[in-house]
């Protein structure tokens, strides 16, 4: 499998140590063990994301746009989607594309279960972290990274499965996203798109338009983000939507 790293700021031949040196020059980082059911992955994280955002805000001058590193956070929906993707990988031999992947947790979970995966994002730092995670977990024969903005980009091939977490937060992206999904989903009976989002994001215009081309099934799942020794934390509701092409 050949990795696509155009525009990502690193060579596809770079070693894990070389990429870690690049990441460490930009951020204070550490690896965190994430376990999805019985799949354990070492995931590179910014050590203190809140402090990094504070420093980023302080360095942003008047009139400049503050670009928050949303790609760096492991969202609750990504964890729930990873559980679904794990079951999907156990049952399918198709190729999977993760869009807006950030650090690529869902794609890495699928690759760890033997699925061929393309982890895509438009942010160069996200691609750097995702590539590091691929190498750290020994998944380079099954997983690649690709620079892709799902509102404007076109990749050179189609996929049996396309998954994405929190990609429905901006209504102006709905039509371009639908076009991207349509152009990159393999036309086969097994093909499926799976999107996860915070339940508070209704995305009704997206699903209203999508129903013209896809059958849609939706499930609401609860997730508690544990904090501290008592294991108590905020409870989240996430929606998992499965889209299959109409026949």
Image (tube, helix red, strand yellow):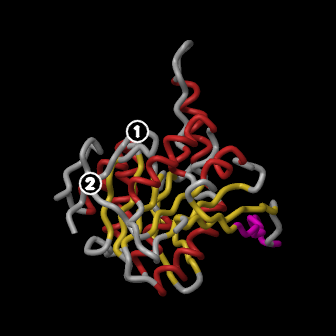
Position in image of residue 103 (x %, y %): 46, 57
* Residue drawn at x 71%, y 62% as measured from the top left: 239
- Disc 2 marks which residue? 156
Q: How many numbered markers are drawn?
A: 2
Q: Secondary structure at mark 2?
A: loop
Does the magenta segment cover residue 219? yes
Does 170 sit left or right of 130 as displayed? right
Q: Residues within 10 Å of mark 2 (few under 14, many from 20)?
A: few
Residue drawn at the location 83% of the way across and 68% of the way down: 232
Horizontal and vertical percent for residue 146? Answer: 32, 53
- Residue drawn at x 28%, y 55% is 19
97 magenta-colored: no
The secondary element bearing badge 1 is classed as loop
Q: Quadrant of residue 4?
A: bottom left
Spot occupied by residue 176 in the image (x, y as percentages of width and height): 49, 41
Bounds of the magenta segment: 218-230
Up/down of 191 relative to 7, above or below: below
Up the image or down, 175 lies above or below 91; here it is above
Given residues 42 and 204, the one toward you in this image is 204
Q: Is residue 237 visible?
A: yes
Q: Is the residue 141 above or below the residue 37 in the image?
A: above
Does residue 28 appear to the left or right of 77 in the view shown? left
Residue 238 in the image: x percent, y percent?
72, 62
Camera-side residue: 68 or 204? 204
| Towards the viewer: 170 or 62 | 170
Residue drawn at 58 percent across, 28 percent down: 57
User: Where does label 1 land, which residue?
Assistant: 152
Q: Residues within 10 Å of mark 1 (few under 14, many from 20)?
A: few
């Amino acid at each position: 499998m050949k990795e696509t790293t155009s525009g990502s700021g690193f060579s596809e031949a770079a070693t894990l140590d070389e990429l870690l040196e690049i990441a460490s020059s930009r951020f204070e980082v550490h690896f965190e063990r994430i376990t999805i059911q019985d799949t354990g992955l070492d995931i590179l994280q910014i050590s203190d994301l809140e402090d990094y955002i504070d420093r980023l805000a302080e360095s942003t001058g008047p009139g400049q746009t503050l670009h928050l590193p949303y790609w760096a956070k492991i969202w609750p929906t990504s964890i729930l989607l990873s559980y679904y993707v794990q079951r999907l990988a156990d049952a399918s031999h198709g190729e999977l594309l993760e869009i807006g992947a950030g650090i690529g947790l869902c794609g890495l979970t699928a690759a760890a279960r033997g699925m061929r995966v393309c982890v895509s994002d438009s942010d160069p730092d996200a691609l750097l972290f995702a590539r590091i995670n691929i190498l750290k977990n020994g998944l380079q024969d099954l997983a690649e990274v690709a620079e892709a903005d799902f509102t404007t980009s076109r990749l050179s091939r189609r996929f049996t499965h396309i998954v994405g977490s929190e990609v429905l937060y901006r209504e102006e992206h709905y039509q371009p996203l639908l076009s991207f999904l349509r152009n990159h989903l393999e036309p086969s009976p097994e093909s499926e798109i799976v999107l996860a989002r915070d339940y508070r994001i209704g995305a009704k215009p997206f699903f209203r338009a999508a129903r013209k081309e896809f059958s849609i099934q939706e499930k609401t799942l609860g997730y508690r983000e544990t904090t501290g020794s008592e294991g108590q934390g905020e409870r989240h509701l996430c929606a998992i939507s499965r889209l299959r092409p109409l026949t």
